[in-house]
Image: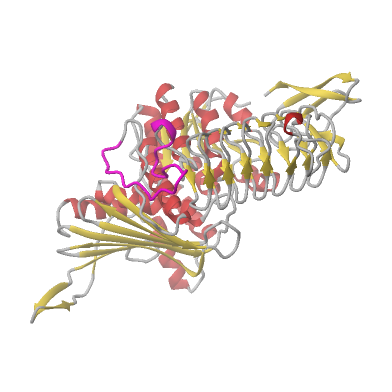
Amino acid sequence: MVSEGRARVPVRRIRSTVWHARRDVRRAGRNESEDFLAGEIERAAEEDSPSIIMDKNIAVVGAGYWGKNLIRNFAQLGALLVICEKDSEKIAPFKEKYPEVEITTTFEEVLKEKAVKGVVLATPAESHFRLGKEVLNRGKDLFVEKPLSLSVSQGEELVNLAKANHSILMVGHLLQYHPGIIKLKEIIQKGELGKICYIYSNRLNLGKFRTEENILWSFAPHDISVILYLLEEEPERITAVGSVYLNPEIFDVTVTNLRFKSGASAHCFVSWLHPYKEQKLVVVGDKGMVLFDDLAENKLTIFRHEVEWKQRIPTPKKKKGKPLPFQMEEPLRLECSRFLECIKDRSSPQTDGEEGLRVLRILEAAENSLAQGGIPVSPSPLSPPSSLTSYPLPLREGSHPVDGMGRKGRRGGYFAHPSAVIEEPCEIGKGTKIWHFSHIMKNSKIGENCNIGGNVVISPEVIIGNNVKIQNNVSVYTGVTLEDNVFCGPSMVFTNVINPRAHIPRHNQYQKTLVKKGATLGANCTIVCGHTIGKYAFVGAGAVATKDIPDYALFVGVPAKLVGWICQCGERLQFKGKSAKCKACGSKYQKIEKLEKLGTATIFLINR
C-alpha cells in the first residue's frame, strides 16, 4: 500500500500558540474557531527552526470530530503515514491537505501495512475494544482515545494482550499532558496548598450527544484521570446520581462523588445539556486553593484565602487571586509526541493501559451507583486484587453481589439492577449487565460482557454466548442458543412450540433454535422454532423467519425471504458474478453451490 518514509520536522515545540491565537481572536472581536486556531498552529509549525529525522509510521483511524486534530498533530510531527476513514465525505479534505499521506477506507489495510508501527484509534467508544484487540494482535503499538473500553473486563484483556505482545498501550487522557495540570501537580507536591481537602471539576457543554455511551463515559474520563493523577491514590467509595432527558437509559447529566482513604474527596459534574461551555477544576487545600480554567486566558489562579475563627464561628478572609505563570504548549501535541517517544525507546507512557484501567474501575462503579439510585459502591478489584477496602452492596434474596465479585469468587463480576430477578443456580459472566425488571431463570447460562435490556426473560437451559446484546422486551425461551456477538432487537420474538395450546402442556415438544455468531435479529421480527440462523445473518425488522437462514444472508418480509447478502461488519454486499468485496472493511466473499433445501446459493468468507 505504502512504503516507509522519513520526514524533517521541527524539534522546537510550538510554545503558547493556542493561548496567543485565542487572545488575538478576542482582541479582534471574532468568535473562536477550531479552523482559526489550527491555522495559527500550522503557521507556527512552519517557522524556521532546527530539525530532526522522524519516522513516518503512524496510522490514524477515524477522521471525525477529534480524529482530525490527531491527524493534524501527527502530520506536523512528520510521523503520519496513513489516514483511515470509511466515510468518503470526511476523507476528501485530507486528500488535498496531506497529499503525501496514504488514504484508505479499510481498517484491514492499516493492519497489513508493515510500515505502520503505531495505530491511533479515534473511533466511537464502543469500537475501542474490538479494533484495539485487532491492533495488538498484529503486534503494533496502540494509542486509543478515552475511554480505553466500555468495561473493566475488556480493558483488562487489552492490557494483558499488550503485555503479552510487548506492545505500547496508551490511553488518550489528554489533561495529564496539559502544562497547566503539570504545574498544578508540582504545586501540590511542594506542599504549597497544604493538605488537600477536596477537588471538584465541571465539564459542561451543549452536545455532542451520543447514543453508544452516556455523559459519564463521554466526558468524565478526563477529569477522573486528572483527579487520580493529582491525589496519587484511588477512591474507596463512589456514589453517582444523574438525569435522563433526551434518550432512554442514556444519562445526560451526572454528578460523581469520590471518597479517598486520606480523607480527601472529589466530585465530578458533567453535562452535555448545558447552555455554555465550561471546563474548570478547583483544588482546595488547608493552605491555599487553585482554579484551573482551561477556557480562560490565565488558566491557573492561586488563592490564599484564610478562615479566621471569631467567637467560635468560622469567618472567611478573602484575598485576590494571583495568576500562576507556566509555559503553555498544545497538550495534544505533547501527547502525540509522547506516543512517538514510547514507540522509539519502548518506554511506558504515564497514561498507559494500567492507568486507563484505574479510570475504568471508577467509571464502572459510578455506573453501578447510577443504576441503583446513588448508593455507595467500591471499585472492583483488578488482577492482582487491589488493597482497597470492599463495601458490599445490600443484597436481595436470590440475587448476587454487585460489588465486582461474581459467581464462584470470579473477579470483575456482573451488574444487576435491583429490580432484576435472578434465580439460583445460573451462570452469569463477568462484565455482563442486567437491567430493570428482567428475569434470569435457573439453569440458564449467560456469557461475558453481555447487555440484557429491560423486561427481558431468559428461560431455563437457555445458553447465551459472550458479548450478546438483547434489547428491551425480549423473551428467550428454553431451547434457544445464542452464540457470541448476537444482537436481538427490541421486542423480537422467539418461539419453542409449533402448535401451542393453553390447555395442553407441550413441555416435551420444545424445538431447538440456534442463532450463530454475529447474527442480527431486527426489532419485532419473529423466529419460528426449530431453525438455525447462520453466522452474521441479518433478519430485518418485522420479518417472520420460517426456515433455516444461511450464513451472511439478508432476509426480510413475511414470510422472510432472501433479498441479498451482508458482510460480517454489517454492510450490504454487492456481488459481481460470484465474488464480492465489502466497501467498508475490505472482506472478500465468494458464492458456492446451490442448496436444494434452501433453494438458494450460499457464500463464504475467503479473505479478511
The N terminus is located in which quarter? top right
Tell whether 98 sits left or right of 383. Answer: right
Identified at 52% across, 54% down, the residue is 214
Above/below status of 259 relative to 271: above
Q: Residue 47 appears at what percent x and percent y?
A: 43, 48
User: Is residue 129 visible to us here?
Assistant: yes
For image coordinates 68% across by 46% down, the residue present is: 474
Spot occupied by residue 414 in the image (x, y as percentages of width and height): 47, 40
Whether residue 435 sits left or right of residue 369 in the image: it is: right
Q: Residue furthest front?
A: 503
Q: How is the image coloured?
A: secondary structure
Position of residue 525 measured from the top left corner of the image (x, y, whole percent):
78, 44
Task: Tell me if I can see residue 10 in this picture.
Answer: no
Q: Is residue 584 above or below residue 19?
A: above
Q: Which secondary structure type mostly characterizes the magenta part of the structure?
A: loop
Q: Position of residue 547 (x, y in %)?
A: 84, 31
Q: Which residues, given as a range, are shown in magenta?
A: 386-409
Quadrant of image for the C terminus: top right
In the picture provided, is 363 more to the left or to the right than 537?
A: left
The residue located at (37%, 41%) in the rendering is 380
